[in-house]
Image (spheres, grey):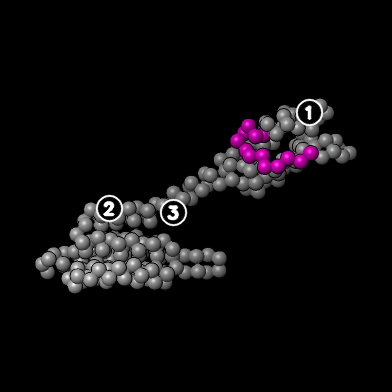
Amino acid sequence: MSDADLVLRLAVAAALGAIVGVERQLSDEAAGFRTHLLVAMGASLFALVSVRLHDTRIAAQIVTGIGFLGAAAIIRGGVTVRGVATAASLWVVAAVGLAAAYADWTLALVATAVAVLVLRTAKRLEARVLRRWRTRRAELVLGLEPGTAGEAVVQRVAATGMLVRGVQFTENDEGRSITLDLEVPAHLSPDTAPDAARPVARVRGFTWSG
């Protein structure tokens, strides 16, 4: 392996690490452009040295070293933890540096592209998915007319797509009533359950946790 080849591999590792680092810098993370560049180049350098010395243990120690560096990037503030994605990106750029050291250009380039794509878009995608599928809780209290079966009311509400987690029947001076404990998908309106039940029951109370 010529010196020119070694320099090329180091330069590619540094450049790819820098690309991921720019994304972290734009996200205002503590470990940004310089850190990711140096980690990628350092991992590549260790790998190249291990090749020259025919000692694979040197490259193997990169994993341990990056683990400590990644842990330092994680910041805990009360119940909030920040920097986990940055710690993961440091692991990735170390692996990219190794791939560049062994001239596996395809792996190095694809890993860099995927890392930047994930760091740029995954957070917004996660928020959309969670917002779409997050469920909320509601309690609906209905007065039942004489002769109205409670099962019919439950079926009407369940047909809207809500999950009926609990049913409680009560009888007092106001007459018979049914209380439904509901799990409501985020895309359904708060009025969906009462509207579905009104043709067969009187709405006495509705508590919405959303």
On whether residue 46 falls in the magenta region, the answer is: no
> Looking at numbered disc 2 in the image, what kind of residue is underneath it?
Val
Please name the residue that numbered disc 2 is placed on: 110
Q: Which badge, 2 or 3, is on the more N-terminal residue?
A: 2
Marks 3 and 1, how far apart at CA: 48 Å
Q: Which badge, 3 or 1, is on the more N-terminal residue?
A: 3
Task: Tell me residue 12's x, y (percent).
Answer: 21, 62
> Looking at numbered disc 3 in the image, what kind of residue is underneath it?
Lys
In which image quadrant can residue 104 be found?
Answer: bottom left
Q: Which of these two is toward me, 186 or 102? A: 102
- Report whether 185 appears left or right of 138: left
Whether residue 37 is visible to the viewer of this picture, yes or no, is no
| Start-end of magenta stretch | 157-169
Task: Tell me residue 205's x, y (percent).
Answer: 75, 42
Please name the residue that numbered disc 3 is placed on: 123
Please name the residue that numbered disc 1 is placed on: 148
Tags 2 and 3 in contact by the CB under 8 Å rule? no
